[in-house]
Amino acid sequence: MEISIALLATLAYFLANAIDRCMGWQTFERPIVAGTLTGILLGDPKTGILMGAALEAIFMGMSPIGGAIPADPFPTAVICVAYTIATGSKMSVAIGLSIPIGALMQTVKTLYAPVLASMSAYWEKLAKTGNVKKFRRLSILQSIFGDRLPIFIVLFLSIAFGTKGLQSLFAMLPDWVMRGFTAGAGMMTAIGFAILVNMIWNNQIGIFLIFGFVLAKYLKLSALPIAIIVGTIAMIYFIVMNYVITHDNEVNQSSIDENKSSDEEDFF
């Protein structure tokens, strides 16, 4: 059972990686997409969507400062969704483990980086031959398989042989520890939102956060109607601001043309 789940989860990772690498970055590597795809292949799309959305809320505020990423959200989403579906445990448990899993997967990528760097001489030699078709074919295969080879292996082994051990471990833990995982998962989601808001906050968009909080806290609306209401307001805001900017540009251009015409008349 675990082997088949591991194979399907690895397939989900492979498909998302291949689509992003071959078609440009289509955000298939984001947790909300990768988690959903994993849930679909494992026969539980609801868990995939919910887990993907929760993990996206945690990781969407993380930025690669100086090219360094503290945790890799892509394989983390696949592993957490697969673990939840395979063991039938609460989603909060997997969410609570998401950061250490992500850090581990990022460490694997970092350790593999020198191997990729050592292949630069081969790619330079191949480029000098001028064989464009061979270069394109091998670079596509490299980006799909070679760049993520250790991730494929670690991801498969962790799901195939690690779920039973984790399940046994969590079965031995007292209830207060499990409640701690639930509380920690909620805190991690809030921290993810806080990091994102800190990056994009300004007075123009801050009102939307306050408005959404009021809708959820005091009007008791669920996520779907809030998304529809705020999405509609955002669209109206975008149309109005686009009109204002366009109008201002036309006015400025007209003023420039008038000044230019006046200067030409004064010259003659």
Image (spheres, rainbow, N blue to C red):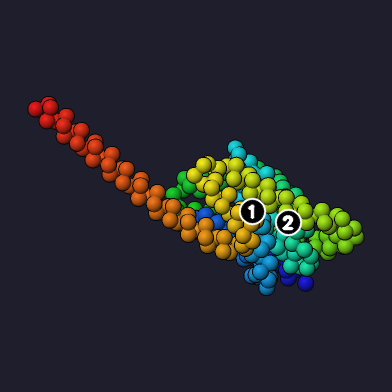
Q: Is residue 238 left or right of residue 125?
A: left
- Disc 1 is placed on an element classified as helix
- Disc 2 is placed on an element classified as helix
Depth check, front residue: 261 or 202: 202
Q: Residue furthest left?
A: 268
Quadrant for the C terminus, please: top left
Depth check, front residue: 76 or 158: 76
Q: Residues within 10 Å of mark 2 (few under 14, many from 20)?
A: many
* Residue at mark 2: 95
Depth check, front residue: 109 or 234: 234
Label 2 amino acid? Ile
**Residue 179, located in which quarter of the rendered image?**
bottom right
**Residue 174, located in which quarter of the rendered image?**
bottom right
Label 1 amino acid? Ala
User: Which is nearer the N-term, disc 2 or disc 1?
Assistant: 1
Q: Residue at x 52, y 54 (%)?
A: 25
Q: Residue furthest front?
A: 218
In x, y percent, where is residue 146?
A: 62, 54
Q: Residue at x 64, y 45 (%)?
A: 194
Residue 95 seen anywhere in this rendered image of the structure: yes
Q: Is residue 22 left or right of residue 88?
A: left
Specify the label residue 248 is tagged with.
Answer: none
In x, y percent, where is residue 89?
A: 79, 65
In the image, residue 212 sits, relative to residue 46, either above or below, namely: above
* Residue at mark 1: 57
